[in-house]
Amino acid sequence: MSLATTAWTLLDQALPLFRDNPRAERFLHAARSRVEGPLRVGITGAPGSGRTTLMNAVVGEPVPTDRLTVDWPGDVELIDSAEPDVDASVWLTPHPAVDVAALRGRDPVTVLVVLSRADELGGGRVDALVSARQVARRAARSPGLGVLCQDVIAVAGVLALGASTMTAAEGEAVVALGKVPKAQLDAALLSVDRFRAATPAAGALLARLGLFGTRLASTLARRPGVDLVGELVRASGVADLRAAIGARFAARASALRGRSGLVALEAVLRREPRSAALVEEVERALASAHDLRELRLLADLDTGRVALGEEEAEARYLLGQHGVTPAERLAVSDDAPGAVARWRAVGEDVRRDSAARRAALVVVRSCEEMVARGVVSA
């Protein structure tokens, strides 16, 4: 039984117990409905972190509301809000010095951290985003932040949105910049004031791309036949963020919605524990939610927190990376018992580090669950 099905069933069992408490009953009805609704992903962070800009950048155009349902595939509701009632969060921080205290208490499988002003690192140099990605990778592997989130991604939100919405006239202005002698243009782009004084189109370009984006765009414009918009969007890092939301959240939407439903029910039962048996079932379901273990391990493999060597490709398939269905997972193996035995041996191999051995046991459990569900014959 999937985590979402388990959550819906337990919520349905709980509803009759709270008929004398209209507030709790409404809350449980809403939680049950959300288990089957779109995945709710909150764009959140401290004031000034660029929530609205980043949400618009992910969509690729200005969004006239703080909520938008998009097809990822599968319905995903992006919410520009700090509200806690979401299934997963994209947590923004403008600087690498992340306030990890703000992430404590959240389930790591529900959190992506974004360095939302990555272009400001390194003084806005043309290679600033390269440096920002290196900072993000180190942060994702760190013992402090790495255990509190799935991944850390560097994104220049202003550049991503500005490039996606660039007008033809602004594109022509960038091309014209590319024809200015490099030494002359570099001197003008040392500061906003210098650039404004030297270039009539400076105001529109700075508003659209920012100083970093304008520097990068003028550099790209010197290359013959360049896809200016495509290269700017790619450089911004927003495609990495879209891919991460798709792989980490949308592909596991059922498990994340189920987790939210169980957490909501647990909160009600903690206040009014009207059924000891139901409390135990909810606790058991959350503790044994293997879907969430798979999601965490895939994130650990992606960020390099766990390494499985030459067996990693098979592990990713068996864990269901990118929405691979259970029926497809053992296509890379001869048979189910063989996969279980092989990965159990990895888990018992003392030559492996402890993280790899623990990871192998998660893969073993994935294979065993597929056999138990009758996905493959033993």
Image (cartoon, grey):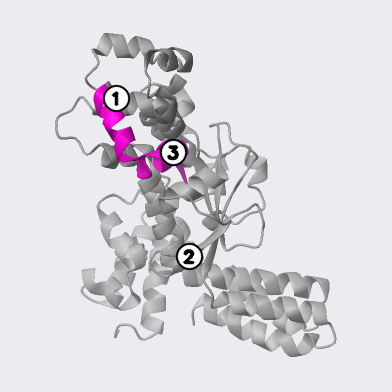
Residue most toward the right? Answer: 20
Q: Is residue 233 left or right of residue 257?
A: left
The quarter of the displayed image where residue 86 is located: bottom right
The quarter of the displayed image where residue 295 is located: bottom left
Circle nearer the viewer, 3 or 1: 1
Which residue range is magenta in the image?
Answer: 151-176
Cα–Cα gap, marks 1 and 2: 36 Å
Q: Earlier in the sequence, mark 2 or mark 3?
A: 2
Cα–Cα gap, marks 3 and 1: 22 Å
Q: Secondary structure at mark 3?
A: strand
Circle nearer the viewer, 1 or 2: 1
- The relative height of residue 179 versus residue 353 in the rendered view (above or below) is above
Where residue 21 appears, x then y in whole percent? 84, 82
Q: Secondary structure at mark 1?
A: helix
Where residue 230 appears, x then y in whole percent? 27, 42
Where residue 173 appears, x then y in whole percent? 30, 28
Kind of residue indicated by mark 1: Ser
Kind of residue indicated by mark 3: Ala
Say which residue appears at 38% left-offset and 41% top-offset. Answer: 237
Kind of residue indicated by mark 2: Val
Q: Which of these two is toward me, 187 or 263?
A: 187
Residue most toward the left? Answer: 224
Magenta region, main secondary structure: helix
Circle nearer the viewer, 2 or 3: 2
Q: Is residue 102 left or right of residue 228?
A: right
Residue bearing mark 2: 76
Assess disc 3: are there few (<14), some (14-19) or many (≥20) residues with their C-alpha within 10 Å of its C-alpha: many
Say which residue appears at 22% left-offset and 68% top-offset. Answer: 332
Residue bearing mark 3: 154
